[in-house]
Amino acid sequence: MSETGKRRTAGALGGLIAAGAALGLGYLAAELSGGPWPVDAVGVQVIDWSPGPVKDWAVRELGTADRPLLRVGICVTLAVVAAFAGLLGSSEHPRVRRSAPGIAVLVGAVGIVFAITSRSATSNVLVRLIPATVTLIVAVAGMYLVVGALRHRDSEVEPEQPGGFDRRRFLLTVSALVVAGAGGVGVSRLVSTGTGEAARSTFRVPRPTEPAPAIPAAAQADVAGAARFVTPNANFYRVDTLLEVPRIDPRNWELRVHGMVDHELRLSLGDLVSRRLIERDITLTCVSNEVGGPYVGNARWIGVPIADVLKEAGVRAGADAVRSTSVDGLTIGTPLSALTDGRDAMFAVAMNGEPLPFTHGFPVRMVVPGLYGYVSATKWIVDFEVTRFQDFTAYWTERGWAVEAPIKTASRIDVPKGFATIKAGPAVAAGVAWAQRRGIRKVEVQVDDGPWQPAQLAAQDTVDTWRQWIFRWNATPGTHKLTVRATDGTGRLQTADQAPPRPNGSSGLHNTVFMVE
Ligand SMILES: Nc1nc2c(c(=O)[nH]1)N[C@H]1C(S)=C(S)[C@@H](COP(=O)(O)O)O[C@H]1N2
Ligand SMILES: [Mo]
């Protein structure tokens, strides 16, 4: 490779490394300040701008991997731009060279704009600016250093190599940048578990005033590969629209209850949990769940009945909805009737005996039995406004999802999995069925195109939880199919009509095809 070629390669590499250092130190600044990492600020804006079909595709094809992939996509884009800037920075022409830090300024400025405008866990603009500003400064400074190290020094250092550059200085510069960037990420890993967890652990799970009855032992279907009746927090599905996870300090949290009420309330976490607390098993389901999909989970929650708080605030005549807002500004609209009709709608503070995990809404989220999460389960809630549906639109309804969305009766086969191979002879299938608020009365399974046969039902915990089922049959060699359907507690059979998740939840029957040997 010619000296010029080497310098160009070094330039591209140096640009990449300068960008990496900027992102690494920006990440540390985000961790320390609580402001958004600029990559996440851009990512959240991309999420908000994505047309419905794109988002549907991402949820369907990428599942929960969509978030890391979005980050990777943005970083790869930045890497290309940074390498290009570095390449320009290796030019012999001073004016071209200067465009390298110029590009860093431009890209950094974009980061600053998104840090201010996009949804994020902090509303304080100054805090929002910190990580983006650090990123910009490091990016520009890094580019300057790289460009400086690449300026060719024909006569002085290596006169015998025209077009060459000071390799020692370049190596020192990029090494320093690598150490800075990697150090930033490394240190932020250390402090992230520390600071966040310390704040979360200041909150002790309160004793429920009304403990839930013990879960019947027979509610758990003991079949290898079937879902656990209670979903462990670590395995609980997560659906939201942020890349960073808000880590609210419980000491600073406050819930504002206002709108069409007689008395506005401002509740600290202490105020909230000093009220009557109920403990309930409730199964959450996401409207984006495809037939047979994983976005459903069952947990034991402790919280304050929302009806109690509404009563205290005094709901004015004419209200029919609540608009709740999470710390990042995302809004959810819930029918007032679902919060006052006697079901166990709550401001939840505990999930399976622990404070809510950060990913599931710490310190407080809503849980409303019978409604899909996007119209009821506001995580990181900070604002609760009693209002009318005609007076607002919520985040998801602005994106083509239904305003009201009760959960549809559904059933799922967990074993045998699709494309599994099982042994011929007596075989066992198992799964779950749910119809929150109505309960499950019957589950039936069809082998190939045979008759519908009743499955054995595990004990029902409550009408708000899913119910497990087991089905035994004699498997004969070959490729076979099982199909499942449920009947809810009102006697209504689950519909076989296929519907996609949008606008108000998928429907259709789940089946699995597998091999018997
Ligand atoms: N703040 C906030 N709350 C939210 C969401 C969100 O994007 N932001 N997503 C909702 C959706 S669509 C669902 S299905 C549930 C999922 O709750 P989980 O992530 O705890 O399982 O949270 C709901 N609450
Ligand atoms: Mo959802």
Image (cartoon, rainbow, N blue to C red):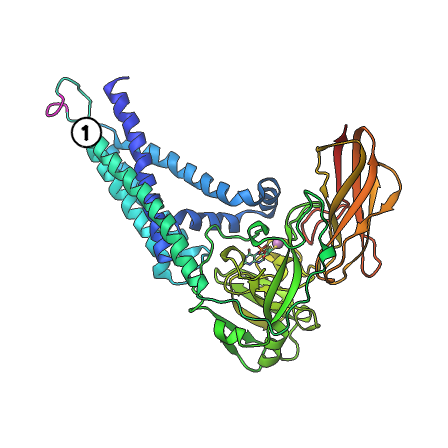
Instruction: Name the residue type under label 1.
Output: Arg
Mark 1 and ligand 1: say if the CB distance to the nearest ligand atom is below 8 Å: no
Residue 141 placement (x, y as % from top left): 24, 43
Q: Vertically, is 509 above or below 196? A: above
Residue 357 placement (x, y as % from top left): 51, 57
Q: Vertically, is 383 above or below 510? A: below
Residue at the image point whose x is 23% and y is 35% from the top: 173
- On the rendered structure, is 147 left or right of 292? left
- On the rendered structure, is 419 left or right of 12? right
Residue 87 visible in this rendered orientation of the protein: no
Residue 150 placement (x, y as % from top left): 22, 30
Question: Which residue is at the front of the view, 167 or 466?
Answer: 466
Residue at the image point whose x is 55% and y is 51% from the top: 234
Name the quadrant of the N terminus: top left
Q: Which residue is situated farthest in the right direction here?
A: 451
| Quadrant of the picture in which ligand 1 is shown | bottom right
Question: Which residue is at the front of the view, 423 or 335?
Answer: 423
Question: Would you name the residue on which mark 1 appears?
Answer: 168
Q: Is residue 203 magenta?
A: no
- On the rendered structure, is 50 left or right of 125? right
Q: Which residue is situated farthest in the front direction here?
A: 217
Residue 230: image quadrant is bottom right
Residue 340 placement (x, y as % from top left): 67, 73
Name the quadrant of the C terminus: top right
* Residue segment shown in magenta: 154-158
Q: Vertically, is 362 above or below 508? A: below
Q: Main secondary structure of the magenta part?
A: loop
- On the rendered structure, is 95 left or right of 186? left
- Say which element carries label 1: helix
Residue 318: image quadrant is bottom right
